[in-house]
Amino acid sequence: MTDILQELQNRGLVHDVSDQSLGEKLTTGMVSFYTGYDPTAKSLQIGNLCAIITMRRLQLAGHRPVIIVGGGTGMIGDPSGKNAERNLLDENTIAANIAGQRAQLEKLLDFDCGKNSAILLNNYDWLKQFSFIDFLRDVGKNFRLGEMLAKESVKRRLNSDVGISFTEFSYQILQAYDFLHLYRKEGVTLQLGGSDQWGNITAGIDLVRKLESAQAYGLVIPLVTDGQGKKFGKSESGTIFLDPEMTSPYQMYQYLVNSDDQSVIGYLKKFTFLPLEEIAALEKRTAENPGAREAQKILAAEVVKIVHGETGLEAALRATRIFFGEAIENVSDADLGAIFADVPSIDIAKDQLAAGINVMDLLALTTLFSSKSDARRSIQQNGAYINNVKVDDIDRTVSTADLATDNALVVRKGKKNYCVVKAV
């Protein structure tokens, strides 16, 4: 067993541990550990990736991951880190979200590697067996109101305008019982989570101690933020999801390649498996030549490869090359939409395009050219492109044969001014 706790500390992945003896426990034998996700969406997001990769590090060090997808607790909603109560989801939506998250986790952790293979469980399977009376009698009696009110997540909400419902207040009891159940059934002795989960985790440790007279542990990782303190994983266009249908590999790549200089080295330590020595050398080169953005490019490539594989990385790199001038052909409508999500677009009747339209007439329809005369000048000055191929004939006819996807082509003026033409 390697000193995995020291490795995590060196990578900035330890915010706090419940007991310093955890390091010794992790070096003397296999530890079964767990973390949980509430199925509030069908996809996990890149903010969740830090914990997932930390789980993978622990698994590679010989320990056993147990993942809880909270079909039960997801019906309640965790108040930790939230300013308002979540909308409660119905069972069908939760089931669909669990299926989506399960598929992603099975790509990121090893579920078939012998004794420390990962397993995925749904806490609804054991929580549904309780009646309200039984839960209060068997579990609730072990919690003291003063201790529950002292939890930071609870105090913050109690002092807010929205307050906190009894439903959310009871969440920490449910999560604590998860820890107890997993200790009894799976031998789990360690819970991993974000630093905002500290109160819930310590509640579980206390419950295991009270009812089983056993030592359990908690390890929380820091919440990841950018250089301005904003939550990692939120872009101007929204959340960066792990599902390629919700966030394309290209969009994920672009989000990461735009990481700020003061954060990128920390991201490399937390989100990649690159050796720390290699990251240190990269940090030095980045300081000497920040304009090259070498660290950002390596971060983006490594993370996209972890999440989407070599195929996803190649798609992201190709999309990047397309945005910067590579000829556009054999691209799907979805991929083209992701690449040019922030550029203007126009519609043209597909029948009109099939019949053929003069290139200057087409260019003048876009937002890039003020008139046919403007389009003519641009062509004559080598400044007009269709699908990133230079237009050199003012008499050229554009037709459906010029579509780069099933339903779109791309017009460019100059180096970086784009407009998508959609055939409808």
Image: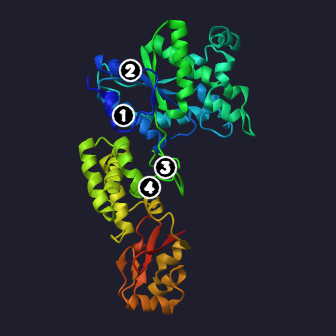
Q: CA distance from mark 3 to mark 2?
A: 33 Å
Instruction: Estimate the x, y position of residue 291 in percent, counting from the top left.
Output: 33, 65
Q: Nearer the viewer, mark 2 or mark 4?
A: 2
Which residue does the numbered mark 3 point to in the structure image? 240
Q: CA distance from mark 1 to mark 2?
A: 13 Å
Residue depicted at 41% across the width and 22% down the height: 33
Residue depicted at 68% across the width and 39% down the height: 84
Instruction: Estimate the x, y position of residue 151 in percent, counting from the top left.
Output: 62, 27
For residue 334, say whether it is visible.
yes
Which residue does the numbered mark 2 point to in the structure image? 22
Q: Are marks 3 and 4 in contact (CB under 8 Å)?
A: yes
Q: CA distance from mark 4 to mark 1?
A: 26 Å
Which residue does the numbered mark 4 point to in the structure image? 255
For numbered disc 1, what is the local secondary structure? helix
Looking at the figure, which quarter contains the N terminus?
top left
| 147 on left or right of 107 | right
For residue 70, say whether it is visible.
no
Residue depicted at 51% across the width and 69% down the height: 343
For numbered disc 4, what is the local secondary structure? helix
- Could you tell me the amino acid type at mark 1? Gln
Badge 4 or badge 1: first in the primary sequence:
1
* Tag count: 4
Give the camera-side residue of 248 and 76: 76
Badge 1 or badge 2: first in the primary sequence:
1
Q: CA distance from mark 2 to mark 4?
A: 35 Å
Q: CA distance from mark 3 to mark 4?
A: 8 Å
